Image (cartoon, helix red, strand yellow):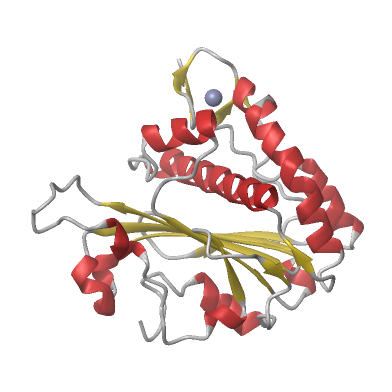
Amino acid sequence: MNECAFCGPTVEPMSPEDLFPSWLSRLLQGLGARNFRISTKPRSGAARLGGPAQRINVRLPVVCTPCNTQWMSQIENQVKPLLTQLILKPDEPKIFTDEQCTALIIWTTIKSIILDHADVAATGAAPFFTQAQRTKLRDDWLPPNRVEMWVGRAKYAKEDSLRVEFTYSGFSRIPSLRKIHHLHAFTVTIQLREVVIQALFLRNRTKPKKGSMNYVPESAYAIQPKNLPWSHFMIQLHPDVGEVRWPPGAQLNRTGFEALTCRISSRAPGL
Ligand SMILES: [Zn+2]
């Protein structure tokens, strides 16, 4: 029996697809990209930055062929025109349509779940995303309940054509967030040339009952650090807070991007 990240156990063949599609590799290579880097901070251990690669050579056989060629391919086709435009013409002002926002949210969630499963395969840990969340994404194109997502813009540096960073953390290690220590977080930051997408997923470490010490109301998941001017750089994509108007007020430099990747993790200085 094979194990698909979205279907669970399945008799379908697995698909040896790249984490990122070939159209994206070709687009970035056409712009002169030569280096792609994947940075990870898995369940345990220090952050790792993979070596520069000539192509986005992250092959993660964690989805079945029907998933990959059907609904995931539909999402890929929906998100392609938007990402292509943002990558090629980042200066062009634009208001995202609802359909574009939805496609980008689902696309980012797909990549996050695949990264989670690749980490699970490597470490033997339990997956962050529940089977119910994964099935809901596949069947209804709905992300998990507790997710925040942003889109922003970085200054282009040649070595940063594509960077992906994912971090898994328990909030118990973040002093200012100690009161919600029973939450676990999974963050993914993707940089596609100047386009930066970041997602923060939260879930309870255990399944607390309402009224118990560990119960966290839904409202507790709005935990954006308020002391940093992230709103200049990052536009909220989800939950919906109004129009997504591109481009953001300011571009992240190299240091800013590094700070962004760890702003909600235990590595964040000053948190
Ligand atoms: Zn599947």
Q: Where residue 43 sits in the image (x, y, percent)? A: 37, 54
Q: Where residue 261 sits in the image (x, y, percent)? A: 52, 70
Residue at 78 percent of width and 66 percent of height? 94
Quarter holding the C terminus is bottom left
Splitting the image into four quadrants, where does ligand 1 fall? top right
Give the farthest residue toward the front.
242
Residue 163 visible in the current orientation? yes
Which quarter of the figure has residue 215? bottom left
**Of 98 and 79, which appears nearest the observer?**
98
Above or below residue 132? Residue 164 is below
Above or below residue 133? Residue 139 is above
How many marks do you count on the picture? 0
Residue at 62 percent of width and 20 percent of height? 66
Quarter holding the N terminus is top left
Residue at 79 percent of width and 62 percent of height? 86
Above or below residue 31? Residue 267 is below
Q: Where residue 244 sits in the image (x, y, percent)? A: 65, 65
Which quarter of the figure has residue 194? bottom right
Q: Is residue 25 left or right of residue 186?
A: right
Residue 41 visible in the current orientation? no
Give the farthest residue toward the top.
11
**Of 21 and 48, which appears nearest the observer?**
21
Residue at 48 percent of width and 24 percent of height? 7
Q: Is residue 77 left or right of residue 269?
A: right
Q: Where residue 227 sits in the image (x, y, percent)? A: 42, 87
Above or below residue 116? Residue 44 is below
Q: Is residue 233 left or right of residue 218?
A: right
